[in-house]
Amino acid sequence: MPPPLRAEVFPAHTPAASQIFTTVLSHGPLTRADVARRAGLSAAAVTKAVRPLIEAGYLVEDADAETRPLLGRPASLVRVDGGRALFIGVKITGDEIFGVLTDLCCRIRVARHLPLPTRAPKAVLASLAELVRELLTEADGFGVPVLGCGIAVAGEVDRAQGTVRYSPFLEWRDVPLAELAAMTTGLPVTVDNDVRALTVAEQWFGAGVGLSDFAVVTVGAGIGCGLVVHGRVVAGAHSVAGEIGHITIDSAGPPCHCGRRGCLQAYAGDAEIAARVGEITGTPITDSAEALALAHAGHPGAREVYARAGEAIGRGIATVANLLGPERVIISGEGLAAYDLFAEQIRDAFTATAFGSAAHCDLVTRPLPFEEWARGAAATAIRGFVRADR
Amino acid sequence: MPPPLRAEVFPAHTPAASQIFTTVLSHGPLTRADVARRAGLSAAAVTKAVRPLIEAGYLVEDADAETRPLLGRPASLVRVDGGRALFIGVKITGDEIFGVLTDLCCRIRVARHLPLPTRAPKAVLASLAELVRELLTEADGFGVPVLGCGIAVAGEVDRAQGTVRYSPFLEWRDVPLAELAAMTTGLPVTVDNDVRALTVAEQWFGAGVGLSDFAVVTVGAGIGCGLVVHGRVVAGAHSVAGEIGHITIDSAGPPCHCGRRGCLQAYAGDAEIAARVGEITGTPITDSAEALALAHAGHPGAREVYARAGEAIGRGIATVANLLGPERVIISGEGLAAYDLFAEQIRDAFTATAFGSAAHCDLVTRPLPFEEWARGAAATAIRGFVRADR
DNA sequence: GTCGCTTATTTTCCACTGTCAATGAAAGAA
DNA sequence: TTCTTTCATTGACAGTGGAAAATAAGCGAC
């Protein structure tokens, strides 16, 4: 069965038009002249590309807010009409699925989640269908179409094929998720790895805007890494890239579930931190919030565990910076709740371990509410729509 | 003073023409139809792009060697005429400079080297000028022009600017080498980092041909890494990338000159291996050849040192593979003389440390005679010529 | 108020690229 | 000999995006 046809086709049939739209999308309202400068095109090209996009409603002219240059004719601003279309983003974890409805600017309009009773693809598909149905119902209220659905899954995902090659949490192997989900939802579906999806969101809508080389490091249950090199998200030849959690920090360190010792994961994974804090304080600890509370309460042992975690993260980031020389590393993830506990160690370890100019790389942090993962999935759907031709 | 004008301009003014030429250059003699298929262009485009290149002598039709397809009209092969032009490649180390004269296919025709009395930029420039003069004299015998000179230097090099930002071996900072060398040699000059230059050579003429994502790891005095992602050599935002020598293997390991312990360099650098072998065998060892001889003679302690080095290298490679998911890693460098001593450990450690599909990455080794470094520099010069417009 | 200056945007060509479809070439097969 | 198949070439052509000129719209000087 062929995948559902897209309800609408994005009217940007040339690379230049795509680029112009993306420029406006990422850099907020801009004058046509600015767009031309940023995109390295002529003003004429911008005028021509913008017209059909305005006619189709994807771009609008901000009549009210004109910018007055110091001299010369006032310019009119062009911006993306976020309300023109909606997208759905879904993040599937081992026991829940999170969904968001976003607009074309990837702003979250509605967020929902459902528990996942079992992990069999069929059951997950059913939950996914239900979640999407709910979101589509919500979408009705906006009176604009939902143009795509992005799904983010941890593990090895082949974006081009739309298949989940291997997902440890779901215990899936070679599930053609895009095809299946397209059939059950009736929407065009993009499937991607969760960290890469987040990276796409940062690249178009976040702290990676305008950068051609940056990395996203997520700290939480696992330590993940998304990379953008030469302006493109790195997918790797075997749909695996950004595996950073098992960089060795200290081969005499704590054992890691991967079978070796002293991996970054063993220092900075949520569960590992909690376990370690439990060990050191002698308190039975069941979840990372408790560990965090103990550390925030000033327990020196607990604080030490977080400090060690920060050091490990800093070293991991330095490894990435040394290898790729990104302009910026965006640190994010649920683990950032503990940021005050290890910020200093991250920076110190990074500075100590980054070589030469790699140390000039800019470290920024971004809080990451959990729905952000689903928003990342929506960003991949938006990208899929805007670049449908490629 | 403006840099010297190029004696010739490469007659490929469109991206398609460049791409077609590079395809023929890398994939040897091809039929036009094959070129079209590989480059994803129409046959008509190939015919049109090839004509001026043949007229200018860069491509030739192999009249003798026709290929007979099973059916249909025999095809004529097109190949690059290596003898059409010459290039110079120079590698500058702390105490010597190596130069090669290559043809357009980057085959070495002449190799020369000179000692470097001092490291001051002025003195190095003088030696460089002399070496280039010698090579130009040799070039006269071929009756074709020398169209460019590539220079490779270890350290932080800004290729676009043509400046050496920082070279630890030369003790240089911010030397505008391309400009200076262009003035003294009268040739168009490209300057690049040595490992990146080697990576360019592999990409166009070696084991990286046709791959869009691969890595080159060099083992020798230092451990280096060149990366190709999305079909382009990674330069990093701060002209530094591929720093792999100080990945931590074991934080309780031997001290490294960088001030930390257990870096890859501390296990697998030439000098470090030699020192370690000396320590363990109680023999005073002054250079790595002696250490190698001891190990080859079967001294168990020495063999163990090499085994440890191999393990460290394998882990370093796995880190790269996990992070970037390359299709292939090319292991090269002078240190490969000891390959038989650590090949097994490299593979084993790689397999043990690579996650999931990253382990499918292909490991190949390439012997690296020292002049190969200079050949890499020549490859950057060839690239500079072929892509002069971009 | 008009003129001249500046910058933004649009319009009007226009060069150029690469594709399409038709044609010619050169085998081997029937 | 004719047909089939694949390679190569040609000429027409549809887009692309740029250059330059024209138009728009403020500001300040007069």
Image (cartoon, coloured by chain):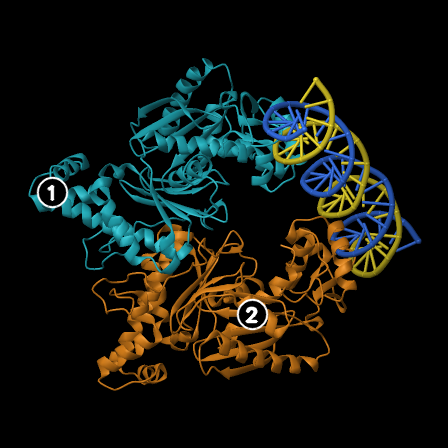
Chain colours: A cyan, B orange, C yellow, D blue
For the residues bearing labels 1 and 2, Cβ distance under 8 angstroms: no
Q: Is residue B123 above or below residue A367?
A: below
Q: Residue at x 74, y 61 (%)?
A: B53
Mark 2 lies on residue = B180
Q: Is residue A64 left or right of residue B268?
A: right
Residue B144 picture location, percent across and down: 72, 75
Q: Extreme left residue here?
A: A282
Q: Is residue B4 above or below residue A202?
A: below
Q: Is residue B186 left or right of residue A313?
A: right
Mark 1 lies on residue = A278
Q: Is residue A139 above or below residue A163?
A: above
For the residues labelled 1 and 2, the Cα–Cα distance comes to 63 Å
Residue B3 picture location, percent across and down: 63, 65
Question: SS for tag 1?
Answer: helix
The crowd level at tag 2 (other Cα within 10 Å; few <14, some 14-19, many 20+) is some
Q: Quadrant of the C terminus of chain B?
A: bottom right
Residue B340 picture location, percent across and down: 38, 75
Q: Quadrant of the N terminus of chain B?
A: bottom right
Tell me whether marks 1 and 2 sit on the same chain: no
Q: Is residue A247 visible?
A: no
Chain of the residue under label 1: A
Q: Residue at x 60, y 71 (%)?
A: B183
D24, A196: nearer the viewer: D24
A127, D16: nearer the viewer: D16
| The label number, if any, that marks residue A76 in the structure image | none
**As shown in the figure, which amino acid type bears the numbered disc 1?**
Gly
Residue A42 sits in quarter: top right
